[in-house]
Structure formats: C-alpha cells, structure tokens
Amino acid sequence: MATDYKNSLNLPKTAFPMKANLARKETELLEFWEKNKIYQKMQQKDKTKSYILHDGPPYANGHIHLGHTLNKVLKDMIVKFKTMKGFYAPYIPGWDCHGLPIEHQVDKKLGSKKASTPILEKRRLCREYASGFVDIQRDEFKRLGVFGDWENPYITMDYAYEASIVREFNKFVRKGSVYKGKKPVHWCPTCITALAEAEVEYADKESPSIYVKFKVINPQGKFTPDPDKGTYFVIWTTTPWTIPANMALTLHPDFKYCFVKTPEGELIIARDLVKDCMEKIGYREDEYSVSEGARAGKELEGIPCKHPWVDREVKTIVGEHVTLEQGTGVVHTAPGHGEEDFEIGLRYGLDVYAPVDARGRFTEDVDEFAGQNVFKANQEIINKIKEMGALLGPPQNITHSYPHCWRCKRPVIFRATEQWFISMEKNQLRQAALEEIKKTRWIPGWGMERIYGMVENRPDWCISRQRSWGVPITLIQCQKCKEFIYDMAVMDIIEEEVEKAGADVWFEKSADELVPPGYKCPRCKSEEFSKETDILDVWFDSGVSHAAVIEADPRLFSPADLYLEGSDQHRGWFQSSLLTSVGTRNRSPYRAVLTHGFVVDGKGKKMSKSLGNVIAPQEITNRQGAEILRLWSSSADYREDMRISNEIIARLVEAYRKIRNTSRFMLGNIYDLDTSKAELSNIDKEDLTEIDRLALSMLQSLVKKVNNAYESFAFYEVYHAVYKFCVVDMSSFYLDILKDRLYTYRADSKERRAAQVVLYNILKSLTKLVAPILSFTAEEIWSHIPGEKEESVFLADFPAVNPEFIDEELEKKWERLWKIRDEVNKALEIKRQEKFIGNALEAK
C-alpha cells in the first residue's frame, strides 16, 4: 500500500480567500472602518507636524465619473501615505453648489412655469437639487474607499460659506479693486449670461471667411487715391455678423503696407500678406500689380473710410496686436465685440457699440437684421456686403477653434455689457500673482509656465452673472445719484445678515432693510436705495475656499500644502484661488499644485455618449470592485491622459490577482509562527541563510523605492515596483526556492522558522506599502496577519528602510546568478519544445 506523505508536510493554512470577491468584501471593510472610526483615529497625531491637502470641490450635479474617481483616489493615496508617515493629515471634502448647471436642471423641471416661479422658490429648488447630489456623490466617493470627514464637509451653499464669499468680495471692494464697466465679455446667448475665461472651452466650429474692402474717403494728403475706381483698405474676418458694429480699421504701426492695383480698385494690404491674400481673393499674379513704395502703418493712421453700407465714417488707427499670421494686416475693429478691439478703442475714444441683445439677436439699431440670431444672419450680411460691391472674392467656409460655453457646449459671442470686474492692475494684482506663481511648486513643472502665461495675459476678471442661483453681488445703489454704496457700516450689516440667514436674505429683504436706520447716501443724501441684481461668478465661490475652509476650520492650517486637480484648473480653480488669496492676503493659498490629465478610452479618444465609449465607475465597482479602480489610478503616469478600457481593466485584474496570491502564499506559511519574537529588531542576521538575507535586502530596496515614489507623487512607480517585487522577486524566485524548506523541514526547525520570520516581515511591510493604493486588500490582509498589531493597517507606521539589512554586494552577486539562470531557462525551454526533455529536472 502506498504511503501518504501529505500529513508529513507543513502545507499552507490561511482563512484569507484566494478569490477576492471584492464587490462584497469591500462593503464589509467600509462598515469596519466606519464602525471603528478608523479615519478619526488616524487624526490623533501631533498637529505641529501637519500636511494639508485641500479638496477642490466637485460640482454637485450628477453621478461621479471616472475623472472624479481618478482625482479622489489620487488625493486619498497622498493623505493615507502622509498619515502613515506620522503627519496630521485631515481630509475635508467639499462641494461646489451654486451656478448655471443646477439652475438649468431646475428650469427643465419647472418647464412652462419657469418664468413665473418666484426667485426665492427657484433658489429653494436649486438648493434641494444640489443637496440631493451631495448625498449621492458622498456615497459614491466613500464606496471607492476614500477616507475623509464625510459627515462634516464644506459646502459652498452653507450659510457660513456664503457669508465668507460676501466678506472676501467686500475686501476687494474696500481695496478699490472692484468696478462696474461696459466691456466686451464672453456671452452665452443660450444661457443668457456673461462667462469668465475659465467658463469657456474651445472647440472646432465652421465659420464663413470673407475679405471686405473699405473705401478711403479722404487720404489726408498721405497718398493719391485711384481716381477711377477708388482706393480701399482690405480686412479679413470670420465673424461677418460683427461688421455692423465696425468702428475702425487697425494697422500695425511698423508693418509695411502696399498699394495693389486691381480691376476692383486699389487695395491696401500688408506687404508680407499680398500674395496669400490675392490668391484667396481669386486673383492670378498677372491680374494685379503692386505699386512701388510701401508705407508703414503709422504713416497711414487717421484716414477716414466709408463703412460698406452703414452711414458711418471709420478711421484707420494703429495697434501692436495686429499680426501677419493670416488675413491682410488690417484688422476690422468693433470695440463692442472684441477684447483687443475694446482696449484699442479706449485709446482712440471709439464708441463701445454692441447692437446685439442677451439672446444673441440684433437689436433695432441694425434695421435690416433686427431680431435675427447673429450666427444665422451671417449669410444675409455677406449678401449685403456683396450687394454694396464691398466683397472681394467668393466667401469660404473654414473650420477653426472657437470659444464655446462650458455648460451648454454652444458657441459664445463677445458682447459689450455692463458687468462687474476685479481689476488685474489695481493694487498690482497681476504682478503680485505672477510673483507667487514663481514661489509655488508646480507638478509637473510645465504647470508653472502654463498658469504664468494665463495670468500674465488675462483680462480683468468678469465676476458678475445674470442668473438666480448664486451668491449675489451685495452692493446697494442710490436711486437718485446712481452711486454704489461702499460704506463699511452697510457692508458689515449685510455680512452679518448673510451669516445668519444665508444669501437668500438678499432676495427676502428690501434695500432699506439692509442699511442702517435713517441711512443717507454719502454723496447726495438721498434715502432711496436699490439692490444690485447680478450674482457672483461661481469661480469666485470656490476660489475663496482658502478663506472659508482652510482658515476658518480649526482642523486645518493655512496655506495648504497641496492643491490637486485636473490640468484644466490652471484656468479655473487654481487661478481663482490664487487671485482671491493674493488680492486679499498678498500670498498664494497653496505651497504646491499637482495636476493630472483627463480620462480617455483605450485608443486615447475622449469619452462621449455619442461614441459609446463611456465607462461608468459604478459598473467597475459593482463588477470587479473599487480596488481595481484604485489600482488603475496608480498604474500609469496620471500626469498624461489616463486610458481605460475593458482590456486595460482585465489586465489590471490579472495583476491584482498576482499581488493578492503572493500575499496569500506568505500568509499561508506563517500560521504557526510566534510573531512576538519575529520583528526585524529581534533577528540575528547570522541565523539567516544567504537567500533569506537577500530577500530582506530586496525588501529594503523596495521600501526605499516606494517611499521615494510616494514622496514625489509617482504612484505608477509604486505600482510597478510592487508588482515586480511580488511576481519576479518573490513568486518566481524567493518563494519558489523556499517551498522545500517551508513544506518539508521539521515544523520548528531553525531553517523553517528563519524563513517564516522573513516572510512575516516582508508581508507586514508589503501590506503597509500598498495600503494607500490597495486600501481594501491591505486591510483584509492585515486582519489575517497573526500576532499583536494595530487595529487597522492605516494606524500602523509606514515602513522605513532598515540599513542593517541592506546588502548591495549580495544583491549584485545574485543578479549575476539570475542572468545565468535566465540563460539556462532559455536553453531548457528550447529542449522542451524539441520534446528532448519533459521538465527541467530531466536535464543533465
């Protein structure tokens, strides 16, 4: 009868399951963390050693997507790592709750009742809508294993936060940085409101491209016009609808301009653009001639010309913004419809004329096109120009990058309206902000150049919006002299009212109730007042979180150590936070800023419902588990766009399985170890075999590499280092060699115990190393590690390198052996394929 040797072997024993069943297990671990208040216990640290990562508030509208997932998991990795390194690192999540998208959703629900719904009722519905999605998103973020003070978040529609917004706005007012003026701003005719730079996205749009000639009325003795067919300045535009508002023609002072003889008259065009321009108009080189003697733009300044059809004289002016990139070198200038046009118009005293209403339709000022949408009127305007003989060549359609509203995704227009602005020049806000940018650490480094260029060139900040759901611009106006009241006594009362009852108080109370009893206008002594009706830009709301949260919350310290968001926030939250902090405190609100890319599909394409390539995080969480999303967040360089697809997820599931099984093998082989004497501090190196010493040295190398990677936010390096360690260094090498000793040596033999001690130390360190990334699995492994230990892996100290166990010479020696082993294995594989041997043991 055959002898059964199974009972003589020390086979692995562990309750840690091979099959993860993450979707179920994760919910159990979430309950464990909540029930045992693990996050709260993690905060019991020395507050003098703090690390504050300030959460950029996601918008409380809709379920979370993969972009949210990546962002929150990256933040969670940092906070957990810093906490395990001994830092006091609280994480206070936040939500952005005011603004147009929420108001749009409420308007949709109201339908035909939208116009008749009182503003306070609409605001109540908006608050209710936002509150509902705060709760939904909170649960979705918690499901990802993200730790934070979820019961005490910051919410921009809370009364205290709204009062902070008003206070910070008033600081700008008191410093004289806020002004009201008529300027062209990005305007969304669909949403019927002004937009800030951060609310504009650029997308391709097809527009008509036309060349138009403006006839010289009087050359002012600077040249002799063509006596037969006249002399004309030629402009090129892709916005024919702005030509009714043309007030001037701008030339560059230093560019040379030529006089081109054609059958349609003499044309004045920048010398360097003549050939290209004439080609596009439709002339062959033998059909026109260029007169000798070009003139500088400054020599042609002040020449009156005739508008193509409006009874208006427009003059030539000069400006440095004119380029030779395309067009004619002569720029059609409409101060009511362009930022640069407006700026140069101020210098020349041009009328800021914008005959377009809030819905993007021409006003009665433009007789022939009144009531028409400006984009739809383009063709009729082209026909009019052609009818007047001012159109040169056939119109072309071109596709170019054009500003679109970030909410409704439709094209916007530049439109001059009365708006409130924060000046970038007053109190040297621009220069001070640029200095702070240089002092900040930007990760990756190109972030500094990006935001520096944006702040250096941005216009004044348009902070007013013509909507209902937001914090009002809390300024009182005198009805008689129309002056706004900047009296601190009035501003203090309003701040207190908002603190008590929220921003709704502005809509509940009359102007008389918001000023001191018997108050008189400081200028004209009138006692009749009205309230400003515009609300503040929501970027101002979230931008003052440094004041409303970091400074106001006793759990936090200012400035924050880190802001972390998508790279689009260089023009959004990073910038609004910087400007509101520098403008009121003369310093940046953050020490460092880290950005990540966008989430794209497996082919690198943007995700969209129309392409059918959208993957919802909830699908992965319910099917494979949130742990796989956490692993994905660490698996590639997030500084670039992050790809995701079912194939990528499948590969990560396989990688996860290998890491899990490596840990399971180690757990299964330390079941009978007395862990009270198994810590590294109790180990005598002389009791270890060479290969055990090698394993501990490789562990120290891993600990060093992983610590450095976390410190530099290179989480993908953590993932790759851990994966290689588990699969190559452990499973394929050390653990493979160890099996004989673990299974066949006497259970309490010195050799087996030494191997177990090494496994125990590797497993404990490995579990802590992966905890910030694989939080669920690390906690599950931790609960199965035998012996006394912390209640949670997150209450344990992060591994530090133990120099006593580093043996670089030994690692080099074995590296040479590995290379020999690899060569031998290649030779054996060839013989296996040739059927010369069945397995390696048959080789001689």
Image: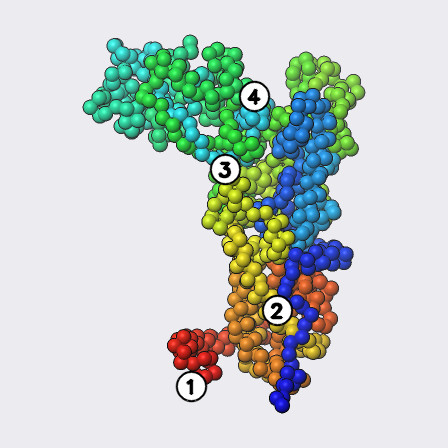
Between discs 4 and 1, the one toward the N terminus: 4
| Dot 1 amino acid type | Lys
| Residue annotated with mark 2 | 663
Give the spatial CA distance, label 1 vs label 2: 35 Å
Point out the residue furthest to the front here. 1
Disc 4 to disc 1: CB gap under 8 Å = no
Q: Position of residue 45 (x, y in %)?
A: 72, 58
Give the spatial CA distance, label 4 vs label 2: 64 Å
Q: Position of residue 288 (x, y in %)?
A: 23, 21
> In front of the other: label 4 or label 3?
4
Q: Counting other residues with Cα less than 10 Å from the Cα at mark 1, is it few (<14), some (14-19), or many (20 or more)?
A: few
Between discs 3 and 1, the one toward the N terminus: 3
| Dot 4 amino acid type | Ala
Disc 3 to disc 1: CB gap under 8 Å = no
Tell me if I can see residue 385 in this picture: yes
Q: Residue at x 56, y 54 (%)?
A: 633
Give the spatial CA distance, label 2 vs label 3: 49 Å
> In front of the other: label 1 or label 2?
1
| Residue annotated with mark 4 | 358
Between discs 2 and 3, the one toward the N terminus: 3
- Lateral position of residue 304 relative to residue 510, left or right: left
> In front of the other: label 4 or label 2?
2
Between discs 1 and 2, the one toward the N terminus: 2
Q: Counting other residues with Cα less than 10 Å from the Cα at mark 4, is it few (<14), some (14-19), or many (20 or more)?
A: some
| Residue annotated with mark 3 | 454
| Residue annotated with mark 1 | 844
| Dot 3 amino acid type | Met
Between discs 4 and 3, the one toward the N terminus: 4
Q: Residue at x 72, y 23 (%)?
A: 118
